[in-house]
Each structure stands twice: as C-alpha cells, then as structure tokens.
Image: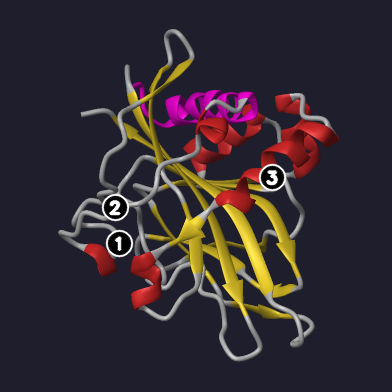
C-alpha cells in the first residue's frame, strides 16, 4: 500500500498496513541505514511500570511537535508520559516517567523522515495546524517460563488521532498477533508483524488495538520483539 492509498484507507476504513518494500521505497531507506536505525533498540532501558505487571519490557520516550505547513518535527522538552482517561485502562490518572530518547535516536534522519510521513497521514484524518507526536521504541522480552506481553492492558485506545506501530525486528519469537477492532469490538484487521519495516496504522478515535503475547520458538533462548510506536494528536 502506498502512502496515498494508506491515507485513503485510514479515512475510509480506519486502519491499514504498509508493507516493508513500500515503506522503504517511500522513505528511501537502504540496508545500512535500517541497520543503523535498528541499533538504537540496543540502548533501551527497563520499563518499571510494565515490570510491576510481570512484563519484561524495555523502552524510551520522546515528544515532538510537528507542523505540517513546514513539515518540521521539532523536539520538545522531555516530559511525563500521560494518556487521556478514556484510553489505557491500566494507567488512568498516572503520569509515567520514562528515560528520554538518546540524542542519536532523536536526531536520526530516518526518524525525521518517518515523522514527516506519519504527519501526512495524520493530516488525512484531521486538518490540524500543529501536532503532538509521541515516539516510543519498545523491546518486549520472553522466555520459556514467561510470555512477553506487548500490550498487557489488552485491547485499548491511546487517546490520540493516529496510532502507528512499526516492526523493527523479531528474534526467536512466535505470537505477537496484532488485532484491530472498531470501538464496539467488531473485527477489522488481524496481522502478525513479522517482517522488519511493516507499518500498522490506525485511526485511534474509531478503533481499538492489541497484540497477543510472544514466546520463544526455541525455549532454550530468549525471544524479543522490537517495535516503534508513534502517535499523533492535536497539540494543546
């Protein structure tokens, strides 16, 4: 699916998928650039809030202001991660503090191109002059004794306009099926993000999303699933 077709499907249906070859062609990504970008996932830190639920998850968090008129994504001062009360049921009224993106990650030219692309898709959903873009790289881990839970909250909303999940990589993992439904729980899309560069899109105002647990293919080795979640909401 091309970005133009993805924007049309988002508007019409509320969810869509951009395949790796299409994304890499759109963003002009070569193999070395993708390898460099994926290396940022080696510098994530434990998520203490997920640990309270028994989930081993690494992450960081960055906040950008995106202005469509200039197609500029401007880094914002680091702040608490807050989700609206009508979204994630696990953290209502709880400001979570996460380590910021590293400078190298925040300034990576590929991240800038991804933000610009997603900003264009967000504009297909709402004509907003300024967007708040939240950037969260995740690594979910699993072992033979413990499944990895990408979404311990289950099916949920993020309380934004556009929600996206980009697969960076998987190792020794089975499971991790992504499901999108409408607000009433009617099925819309199910897919397993298994090829790096696959991008799942959703109009968060109209949909719920969740990901099933992962576990190791080879129980003697750990499993991991690396994704980049980026959301766009109108800037306050």
Label 2 near label 3: C-beta < 8 Å?
Answer: no
Q: Does the magenta-highlighted stretch encompass residue 127? A: yes
- Quadrant where the C terminus is found in the figure: top left
- Which structural element holds mark 2? loop
Residue at (74%, 87%) from the top-left corner?
219
Residue at (48%, 55%) from the top-left corner?
59
Q: Residues within 10 Å of mark 2 (few under 14, many from 20)?
A: some
- Which structural element holds mark 3? helix
Q: As drawn, which residue projects farthest toward the right? A: 31
Q: As drawn, which residue projects farthest toward the bottom? A: 145
Label 1 near label 2: C-beta < 8 Å?
Answer: no
What is the CA distance from the residue labelled 3 to the residue labelled 2?
Answer: 24 Å
Above or below, 1 relative to 148? above
Between discs 3 and 2, the one toward the N terminus: 3
Residue where numbered disc 1 is placed: 88
Residue where numbered disc 2 is placed: 97
Residue range highlighted in magenta: 109-128
Q: Does the magenta-highlighted stretch encompass residue 40? A: no
Above or below, 94 relative to 29? below
Which disc is residue 38 wearing?
A: 3
Label 3 near label 1: C-beta < 8 Å?
Answer: no
Q: Residues within 10 Å of mark 1 (few under 14, many from 20)?
A: some
Above or below, 2 relative to 127? below
What is the CA distance from the residue labelled 2 to the residue labelled 1?
Answer: 16 Å
Look at discs 2 and 1 and give the one toward the viewer: 2
What is the CA distance from the residue labelled 1 to the residue labelled 3?
Answer: 27 Å
Between discs 1 and 3, the one toward the N terminus: 3
Q: Nearer the viewer, residue 151 or 46?
A: 46
Q: Main secondary structure of the magenta part?
A: helix
Which disc is residue 153 wearing?
A: none
């Amino acid at each position: 699916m091309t970005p133009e077709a993805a924007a049309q499907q988002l508007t019409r249906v509320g969810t869509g998928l951009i395949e790796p070859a299409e994304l890499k062609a759109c963003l002009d990504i070569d193999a070395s650039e993708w390898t460099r970008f994926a290396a940022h996932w080696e510098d994530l830190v434990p998520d203490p809030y997920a640990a309270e639920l028994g989930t081993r998850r690494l992450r960081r968090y960055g906040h950008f202001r995106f202005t469509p008129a200039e197609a500029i994504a401007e880094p914002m001062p680091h702040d608490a991660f807050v989700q609206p009360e009508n979204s994630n049921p696990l953290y209502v009224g709880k400001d979570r503090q996460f380590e910021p993106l590293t400078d190298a990650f925040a300034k990576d030219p590929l991240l800038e191109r991804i933000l610009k692309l997603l900003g264009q898709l967000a504009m297909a959903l709402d004509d907003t002059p300024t967007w708040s873009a939240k950037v969260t790289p995740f690594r979910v881990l699993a072992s033979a004794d413990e499944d990895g839970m990408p979404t311990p909250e289950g099916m949920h909303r993020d309380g934004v306009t556009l929600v996206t999940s980009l697969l960076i990589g998987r190792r020794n993992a089975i499971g991790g099926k992504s499901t999108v439904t409408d607000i009433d729980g009617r099925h819309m899309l199910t897919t397993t993000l298994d090829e790096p560069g696959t991008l799942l899109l959703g109009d968060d105002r109209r949909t719920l999303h969740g990901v099933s647990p992962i576990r190791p293919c080879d129980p003697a080795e750990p499993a991991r699933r690396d994704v980049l979640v980026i959301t766009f909401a109108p800037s306050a």
